[in-house]
Amino acid sequence: MKKTAKANSNIALVKYWGKRNEQIILPTNSNISMTLSGFNTTTTVEFSSDYKQDQVELNEQNLSEGRELEQIVKHLDLIRRQAGMEEKAKVVSKNNFPTAAGLASSASGFAALSLAASKAAGLNLDKKELSILARQGSGSASRSVEGGFVEWLKGSKEDGSDSFGNQIAPPEHWPEFRMITTIVATEEKKIKSRAGMKQTMKTSPYYKGWLDTVEEDFNVVRKGILDKNFSVVGKTAQKNALKMHATMQTTLPPIIYWNPATMRILHSVIEWHESGMDCFFTIDAGPNVKVLCLEKDVEELKKRIEALDGVKEAIVCEPGEEAKTIEKHLF
Ligand code: 2P0
């Protein structure tokens, strides 16, 4: 009844920004990500009749109340219902990167929790079933179940059975692809993605423009990955991220995740690109920019990024592996 899983985070090249169903988390548009090597969550789950209530420890802190605990308990309830059991659980989870700094900790977190808890509950889910389960914890987690380049299909069914993460290509398909994650802030962001995307759908006049054009970005990036066409993937991913930020910046009240260091990186990447360097950027719901490049340019770009004012760290990520169970438990 005790299992441990490790899942990598992912960064979207075509973003998920909006839900067509908030209860079971279905997206308004299909989206694409790369699973990252290096940023991961390890989670151990044990179900036992000895536990009187669910206990959750996240990054060495016991969660006694709050939204995070509620989301995790709700997810455990879903797994207990699927497994036909009632035992409470102990969950211990650790990220190897700062939580909620726009580095998609909910993606690796719910992917690891789904895998560890479903195995501990005796369920033997296939990849698709596991992704559907992870999706209901946090949308982006549906993509972290798989490795390499992954699409999360929006699906059309009301029950969500056709909305899951699907591998477009494994890490070995394009091992030269890099994302340099720049850390400019490590504090928790004020507006979570969940609230941000809801507010955007409700009040941004540009959301319609997002919906009208995102499918084309999806098709272009998908083909670009299969063709290993870096300039097509990079250019389209950058445009897609800026479009997403344009929708959130035009909500009421506005959501602006960028800080001066973010702007400095964006301008620099554009300038470097104009002077012949193969580089683009993407940004999620936070201030940390991810610079997209190929292995050949990583050393030079890392040096340039680290020299920019306000950059605390630049971490190079490669295409990473799928979520896996491991033997070493956290308790
Ligand atoms: C993405 N983000 O595609 C987009 C881009 C943030 C910006 O997926 O409400 O934490 O739990 O489904 O998955 C972050 O949203 O939101 C996210 P919920 P989630 O990576």
Image (spheres, rainbow, N blue to C red):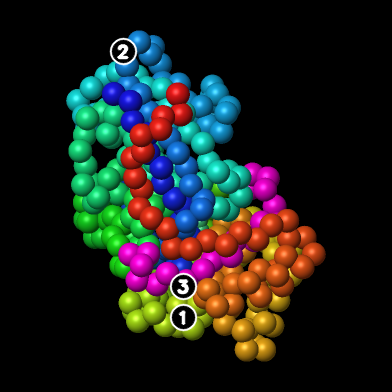
Task: Point out the stretch of residues depicted in magenta.
Answer: 170-190
Question: Residue at 42% across / 82% down in the picture?
Answer: 229
Question: Residue at 55% across / 43% down in the picture?
Answer: 96
Q: Residue furthest bottom?
A: 275
Give the mark nearer the N terminus: 2 vs 1: 2
Tell whether label 1 touches label 2 (CB within 8 Å): no
Residue 326: in magenta span:
no
Asked whether residue 118 is in view, the answer is yes
Q: Amino acid at mark 2?
A: Ser
Tell whether label 3 touches label 1 (CB within 8 Å): no
Q: Secondary structure at mark 2?
A: loop
Q: Amino acid at mark 3?
A: Glu
Real-space CA distance between mark 2 and mark 3, rounded to the nearest whole angstrom: 48 Å
Q: Is residue 275 left or right of residue 174?
A: right
Note whether 261 is above or below 68 in the view shown. below
Real-space CA distance between mark 1 and mark 3, rounded to the nearest whole angstrom: 10 Å
Question: Residue at 47% across / 58% down in the picture?
Answer: 36
Q: Quadrant of the N terminus?
A: top left
Note whether 131 is above or below 152 in the view shown. above
The residue wearing badge 3 is: 176
Identify the mark at residue 230; answer none if there is no mark. Answer: 1
The residue wearing badge 2 is: 49
Q: Tell whether circle 3 marks a residue whose Cβ is less than 8 angstroms from ligand 1.
A: no
Q: Residue 224: image x %, image y %?
A: 38, 79
Q: Residue 178: image x %, image y %?
A: 51, 68
Give the mark nearer the N terminus: 1 vs 3: 3
Q: Secondary structure at mark 3?
A: loop
Q: Secondary structure at mark 1?
A: helix
Image depth: mark 2 or mark 3 in front: 3
